[in-house]
Amino acid sequence: MGIRVGVLGPVELTRDGVPVALTGVPQRVLLARLALAGGRPVSVAELIDALWEGEPPDNAVGNLHSYVSRLRRHTGGDVIRRDPGGYRLALKSDDPAAGPRRHDASRADDHAASAGRGDASEADDHAAAARRGDAGWEDDHAAGARRDGAGRGDAGWGGYGLDVDVVEGLVGVARRQPADLAAATLARALAVWRGEPLADIADRLAFAPDVARLTEWRRHLREECLDRRIDAGQAAEALPEIEALALAEPLRERPHLLLMRALHATGRAAEALTVLRAYRERLSEDHGLDPSPAMIDMQRRILEEDPERPRRARSANRFFGRTAELAAIRAALGTDRVITLVGPGGVGKTRLMTEALSGEELVVELAERSVPADVAAAVAGALGMRSAPRGGVTALAERLGASPSVLVLDNCEHLLDAVRALVSELIARCPEVRVLATSRQRLDVAGERVVRIGPLPASDRVALFCDRAALLRADFRDDSRTRELAAQICELVDGLPLAVELAARREAVFGLAHLRDRLGAGLNVLDPARGGDRATGVSATVEWSYRLLDPAAQRLLDHLAVCRGGFGLDALPYFQDDAEPLLAELVDASLVTCDLSGEQPRYRLLETVRHVGIGHLGPDGERQARAAHARWMSDLARELVRRGRDRDPWTTPTLRREVANLQEALQWMGDHDEEAGARMAALLAVINSDAPDPGLTEQLAGWRPDRIETESDVLRGLAAGNAEWLRGNLAEADRLLTAVLDRMPGDHPLRWGALIVRISNAMFAGRAADVRADAERMAADPGAPRWARATGICCAALMDVYGGDPDTGLAWLDRYAEHLNTDGLDGFVPFTRGELIAARDPAGALAWYDLSIAANDRVNQVYGGNVARVARAAVLIRLGRHDEAVTACRETIVAVRNANMTAQVWTMARLVAELLAALGDPESAAALVAAAAADPFAPAVMGPDRERLARLRGPAPVTIHDPVRFCLERLATGAGKGSARHQQAPPRIVRS
């Protein structure tokens, strides 16, 4: 009978049928490690690690040799062999040189003949397999079990030396048997277990993967045995055991599927459906999940009185969007050998993959697999081969064969090396096999086609949210207000389908508005109350990917989480040295998105990832990360001002791109370093006046000091004064800027920034003398940029023309002509020249305005370009070119509103009043004039404009709350009276 080893229970050794007492833990560890290697040599280092778990004694090698020697006394010297690669256990082998469990052709023939089927082709197959040297994974064991063990009450070891091989042999037999015999054979296989696998050494970390694999195998075989019993018409007899199994494993789906089948087979369909309802409720309450498509398909079959076993089915929930991605996947399946759907957790890769399939593919789910060997085991199981293989890619390739097929590997990211090796081998061996994989990281296989999956587009994410919310609440109203709030909620969760669906579930608890507000404060509201896994919680799905990272990459990700709105490569040195390889790892892992559409790559963490990363930092870590972020933003603010002095076109796009980061850093500095924050606020105020951002403007207004005494107060006053000017609060802006300039040294590097804004502010207030005085100060300031000196001089000239004296303005420009060469800087000088001649030569003025707009656009000067557009619209109105004027007014009033240029909004409203009066709508014109007169933020009216506006005054039949919307609506109506082409809907209004 020879040596037999058991690991399906406490470690056991028998010799010629007699149990051998293993006196110590080292002997059991050594025997189990060798037995589980499947005949392969086990290195000395691996054995030492198993014996001493990373803490070997000084003479570990000597002790190992001693343990081997003692074990050999029990097994015989030829069973434990010393090979160049280490030690190996040679259990059943007729030919010592043949390798682990390989048989010659004659034995393979004997195996086939002993099956009693008289199938010559099967014998030939076995013989061929033996000559190849692989012996055919399952067929070899199955034949052995048929010859030696089938029919024995104790399951019969036959010629096997390891109990795992006995079970594998019986499983192979069962697959070829009808249901009743298969159930009996699987029962014998289960009887081989003597308890929990490796029970007496299961606490050893070295055996954790083996324990997990063998435990799961036992559960799987028990479920398979019950499945076969139902197929054999033994549902009633199996039902008590199935009920006990489902009760013991309340969240495992397979027992509940079996219970539903058994109940239905015994005429208890209503109870079967009750099982589904209870299971659905338990999943939803505990994890926020729905049952799988297989269980939904079982429900459908029961309802249709179709008790056949379920096949893979699509989800019962509606699928939204992804048209382009579906087309790309289907096209790739026709041309490429390996296609990988790559995207962050929760983006919907599995659902998209399911929608793309025809139903004929071989689908292998890897999410619950934990060790590399499980990849081959999962594929083998899907192919109907043994469920716990060790190695055997050759056998997999043989089973797949040369016929066209698609192998789908779902959730590969945690087993990348094993998946990569398996796919590479299968693609090389099977020319007609294609592989479709889903992963958070590409497989990196030759010829791999990567299809990147991003968040849902805006319309699809809102449709998904509303659909799922309506399923949970019968009174859910799908109207325009609902969709507006739903769009805000979906934006807060990055449009990730998992997060959108979880948010829809929370809507039934909080309602739309409260849910939006809670999400704005953090994403914790989406996580299950009692934990959750990567399929049930937003944080859990990110944590899953996070744990797969190198520790250095984890640290970088956590620190980058403080960046809001993305970052470029320039940010990395502030957070970590030599970080580019780590960033590449984060992008590959789909934790950082990469946008290559611009001149420079742009990277971003989804809000779900930021939420988790910041949570990892802790107070000290977050303080360090935010300090690094603040240094990056402070340096950027200084660079913006430096390059803004020269009107560098880089400045405005950079401000726009980084405004969210600038605001985030400014907020943190205000709470932790007020002096540094004041310096940064002043720098941002100077640069923001050229291309105003509404959010930044409001934040800068919050830096207003109580009094202006210190250097920090001066900088805070500059920031708040600039902001109040942009908001149209002219009196407060003048008060702050005057106090700033009174305390600011003459050589202060930002003095010109305060002066230029006070000049503009005095213009809107109609104080010509103050404008001229500050213009002279600016002209004499050697630290002021050339364009700033020219702008101050031009503003003084503009006060003359607005006061009705353009000749004096022209003379003023001639006096300071040496300061007016600003070619390549901006377009304020040509704008001024246009204003000076507009009254007597409007056509010539238009040419100057066009030059100004082009010059400002070249250097991205939003403010100056919009001012020129306002002037252009005014001339078009006064020339009577009403069609062009309507278009210009519609575009310009939206542009100044979007730039938060409050004074120009009211200037445009007054111009629209002129145009509406000319188009035959004097009531709307009067209402606009009255609204501007009543608003303290509207600029003063000067010169000829007083008379023009006075003619428009009259009864105001309506009160105007939103001048921009009112103007757009009236322009659409009024313009339609003379030209049908203006009857289109007004452009979208972006509110500040």
Image (cartoon, rainbow, N blue to C red):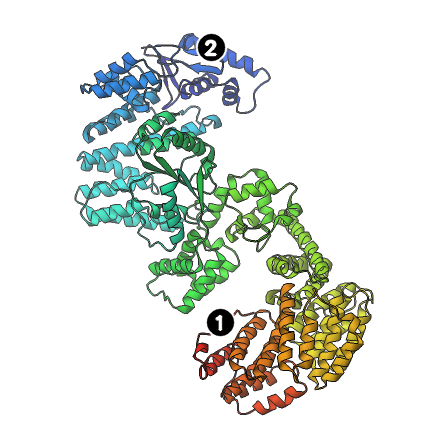
In the rendered structure, which amino acid carries the disc numbered 2? Arg
Give the quarter of the image for residue 177.
top left
| Left or right of residue 16: residue 671 | right
Q: Amino acid at mark 1?
A: Pro
Where residue 633 sits in the image (x, y, percent)?
66, 55
The local secondary structure at tag 2 comes to helix
Q: Secondary structure at mark 1?
A: loop
Q: Residue at x 29, y 43 (%)?
A: 359
Please name which of the two marks, 1 or 2, marks the residue nearer to the observer.
1
Residue occupying image coordinates x 51% and y 17%: 44
Relative to the observer, which residue lies in front, 935 or 1?
935
Q: Position of residue 90 (x, y in %)?
A: 40, 13
Looking at the image, tell me whether mark 1 or mark 2 is earlier in sequence order: 2
Q: Is residue 159 left or right of residue 455?
A: left
Where residue 444 appears, as percent x and y from the top left, is 48, 37
Q: CA distance from mark 1 to mark 2?
A: 88 Å
Mark 2 Cα shell of 10 Å, populated few (<14), some (14-19), many (≥20): few
Q: Quadrant of the C terminus?
A: bottom right
Check disc 1 and report the residue beneath it.
987
Which residue is located at x 62 percent, y 70 percent?
A: 853
Q: Is residue 788 above or below residue 151?
A: below
Residue 974 as seen in the image, left or right of residue 830 = left
- The reply to whether residue 544 is visible in this rendering is yes
Looking at the image, residue 119 lies above or below residue 844: above
Res 456 → quadrant: bottom left
Q: Indicate the quadrant where residue 1 lies.
A: top left
Q: Where does residue 513 sit, x and y in percent of width and height? A: 46, 65
Label of residue 70 in the image? 2
Q: Identify which residue, 603 or 281, lies in the foreground.
A: 603
